[in-house]
Amino acid sequence: MLTMQNSEKLAVLCYNADKLTKELFFSCGVSENFYSRCIIRGVSKENEFSNIVKDQGHYNISKARAELVSISEDIISENKDVGAFLIECTDMPAHAAAIQKAVNLPVFDPTIMLKFLHGVVNC
């Protein structure tokens, strides 16, 4: 389980930040205190990453990775108290290692959760 200090924040990378509302977090049991420590950033306006959803017929993985790393570095430069990153979008796990290397913080994604659940079920 991820344990963060009371002063640390969680950076949440998602496709559409407008969809990750306070009400959604509360309906999932997230406390007001923890929600206030979340920094939510969407990438729907990024040139390359948005091509995945727009179905443009092309997607340059290197450019998309660079966009995500740049956003992550921006989050850290603006918020020195980030303790971890959470990737919400299922199109992002391929970039988790690059983000982790760039920001030198733990990065959690849906793939990690599925591996955890698989390990629990198959004990």
Image (cartoon, helix red, strand yellow):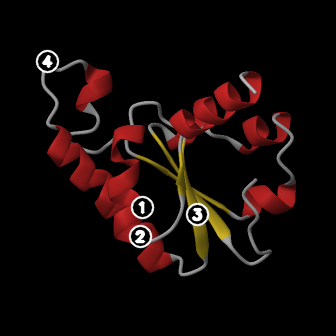
Crowd band around label 4 with a 10 angstrom C-alpha radius: few (<14), some (14–19), many (20+): few
For residue 44, say whether it is visible: no
Q: Secondary structure at mark 3?
A: strand
Q: Amino acid at mark 4?
A: Gly
Crowd band around label 1 with a 10 angstrom C-alpha radius: few (<14), some (14–19), many (20+): some
Which residue appears at 24% of the width and 18% of the height?
A: 55
Which residue appears at 32% of the width and 56% of the height?
A: 98
Q: Up-down: is 83 above or below 121? A: below
Residue annotated with mark 3: 84
- Tag 1 and tag 4, C-beta contact below 8 Å: no
Q: Secondary structure at mark 2?
A: helix
Calculate the distance from the C-alpha at mark 4 to the C-alpha at mark 2: 31 Å
State which quadrant residue 85 falls in: bottom right
Residue 57 circle label? 4
State which quadrant residue 66 falls in: bottom left
- Tag 1 and tag 2, C-beta contact below 8 Å: yes
Q: Amino acid at mark 2?
A: Val
The C terminus: image quadrant:
top right
Q: Amino acid at mark 3?
A: Ala
Residue annotated with mark 2: 103
Residue 100 circle label? 1
